[in-house]
Image: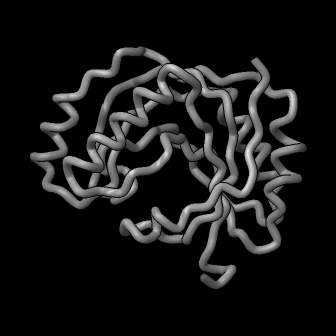
Amino acid sequence: METQDRIIAYWLCPAEPAREHLSLLIRDLGARFDAPVFEPHVTIYVTNAEHENPESILEKVVSHRALYRLGVRNLDYSEKFTKTLFVQFAPDAGLVRLSEELRRASSSADDYQLNPHLSLIYKEMSTETKRELAASITLPFAEVMFDTVKAVLSPAEIKSRNEVAAWRVVTERRLTP
């Protein structure tokens, strides 16, 4: 992968017990639909990997930051591969500030539109199948606590299982309880 073909994605990762529940759901959907399995996360900022120092950025931006609690709005689906079926969260001013601080600390301050969601499956499938899946899943919580921010090296385009398999966590920071 050429450097310009890679990004650093900053993820907000859920705490227990939601983490385990969402991980099981992602694994189950992956097995049922022959789709890639991945760690549950909300992408909060994305930038070009070239000249980026994610360890320094997380140290600067995330140190001493408290846990985040996001309210679940609904389950939804789209035509986008990385948003096949997802949990949509309510907007959160604190999360917007975190995303902005990551942008300001990055070497290339890319324009990133924060839309807090957590994908459950990445798979090309019919609208009817996605609609049925969304209707069949009931989450046992109305909000999710998040306790970790991770920097993930990724191909710039995610359109298949191979690109998902190429993700690599390069550093992470726990949030303060």
Q: Position of residue 91 (x, y in %)?
A: 54, 29
Residue at 41% x, 32% y is 22
Q: Position of residue 29 (x, y in %)?
A: 27, 44
Depth order, front residue of 53/97: 53
Residue at 73% x, 37% y is 98
Q: Is residue 46 visible?
A: no
Which residue is outermost to the bottom?
2
Work out which quarter of the rendered image holds the C terminus and state it. top right
Residue at 53% x, 41% y is 41
Q: Which quadrant of the figure has residue 107?
A: bottom right
Above or below residue 104? Residue 28 is above
Q: Which quadrant of the figure has residue 35?
A: bottom left
Left or right: where 105 falls relative to 36: right
Which residue is outermost to the left?
128
Q: Is residue 93 visible?
A: yes
Residue at 71% x, 69% y is 49
Q: Position of residue 19 (x, y in %)?
A: 50, 29
Above or below residue 89? Residue 82 is below
Depth order, front residue of 162/4: 162
Left or right: where 167 falls relative to 62: left
